[in-house]
Amino acid sequence: MRLLSLLLLGTLAVGCTSGDPSSPSQPSAQGPTQDERAAEAMLVNAGGRIDKDGSGAIVLVDFSGKPIDGNLMKRIGTLPKLQKLLLRGCPVDNAMLQKIGTPQDLQVLDLRETKVTGAALEQIGQCTKLKNLQFRGNPITDADLKHAGRLTELKVLGLDETAVEGASLESLAGLKQLEELYLFGTPFKEENLAKLAPFTKLKRIRLRGTKIDGSSFEGLADLSELEDLDVSETNFSDAAVEHLLQHNGLKKLNLWATKITDKSLPSVAQLTTLEWLNLDRNSIGDAQIEELTKLPNVTWLHLGSTALTDDGLQKLAPMTQLKTLIVTRTGVTGEGAAQLASKLPETEIQHVYMPEN
C-alpha cells in the first residue's frame, strides 16, 4: 500500500511539470521569453535605448532622433508590457505607427517632430492608459482631437506648433486628470480660452505665440491649481494681468514680449507665490519697478530689453532672495550693476548681453 502511494505521488509530480516553460506561448515567471529577448537584441542593435522592469520585461523604448523602420515598429508592438515609447524626431508616419497596434499598458507616447498626422489619433485613442501624449509640429486640427477624448487618464497633452485653434476642446471634456497643456505656436484663439475652464487640475499651460490677449482669463477662476503659465509673444495686456490675481498659487509666469506696461506691476506684485518671473521685452521702466520688491519668493527675474536704468535697478535692493537677475539690453551700466551687487552679494546679476553660440 505504501508503494502504491509513492507511485501516485510521482505521477502527480510529473503531471505538474509537463509543458515547455521556455515556450513563447507560455511566458516564464522567471524572466522574458525567447521572443522578448530577440526583440531586445534587435532594438538595441538598431540603436534604441530600452529600460526593463524587475522581471526583465521591456517597459521603455527610446528611438528619439534615430532612424527606425516598419520592421522595428512591428517588433515594438509585440512587447507585452510596453509603457513608454519615445519617437521624437524619428521618420515615423501613420502607416508605421499602425504596426505597433494599441499597446494596452502604454502610458507615455512622444511623437514630436514626426510625420504622424491627426488621423493617427483614432488609433492612439484606443491606448486608454496613456498619461502623457506629445506632439509638436504635426498636422493636427481641432477635428482630430475628438479621438483623444477617450484618454481619460491623460495628464500631459502636447500640441505645440499644430493647427489647433481650440474650437473643439469640448470633445476633450472627459480629460478630468489633465495637468499640463502645451499650445505654443498654434493659432489658438482668444474666444476659445474660456473652454479650458473644465480642466480644473491644470497646473501648467503654455500659450506662447498664440492668438490671445488674455481677456478671457476672467472665466478661468476654477483653475485653482495653476502653477506655471506661459503667455509670452502674445497680446497679453495689463488688464489681463489683473485676471491672474484669482490664481493664488502661481509659481512661474512668462510675460516675455507681451503688451504689458508699468501699469501692470502693482498687479504682478500681488502674485506673491511667484518664484520665477519673466518681464523681458516689455514697456517697463523705473516708474513702478519697486513694486516687484513685494514678491518675497521670486528667485529668478528677467527685466532685459526694458527701459530700466541704474536708478530703477537700485530699487530692487530689498530682493535679497534673488539668485538670478537679468537686466541685459537696458540702460543699466556696469557701475549700476556693481552698486546693486554690493547689496545683493548672493545674486548673479547679468547686465551684459551674451548671444548664444
Image (cartoon, grey):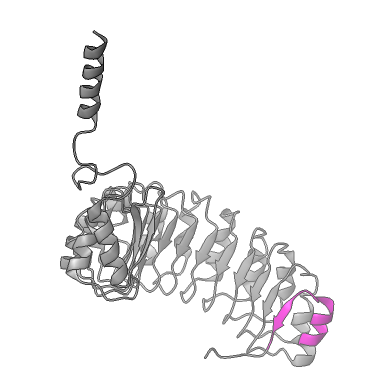
Spot occupied by residue 172 in the image (x, y as percentages of width and height): 31, 52
State the image quarter where residue 21 is shown. top left
Left or right: 352 with respect to 148? right
Q: Position of residue 115 (x, y in %)?
A: 23, 73
Decide which of 109, 182 is in the foreground and name it: 109
Residue 71 location (% of width, % of height): 18, 67
Between 282 and 120, which is closer to the camera in this rendering?
120
Residue in view at x 69 percent, y 90 percent: 331
The quarter of the picture where the N terminus appears is top left
Q: Which of the 4 image quarters holds residue 207?
A: bottom left
Measured as percent of width and height from the top left, residue 236 is found at 49, 71
What residue range appears in magenta? Answer: 337-351
Residue nearest the viewer, comparing 282 with 76: 76
At 39% across and 67% down in the image, what residue appears? 183
Report the label total.
0
Is residue 345 visible to us here? yes
Q: Residue furthest top?
A: 1
Say if the magenta span includes residue 257: no
Q: Residue at x 37, y 52 (%)?
A: 131
Residue 196 occupies which quadrant of the picture? bottom left
Residue 134 shows in the view: no
Outermost residue toward the left?
95
Horizontally, residue 352 falls left or right of residue 173, namely right
Residue 341 within the segment the image draws in magenta: yes
77 sits to left or right of 48: left
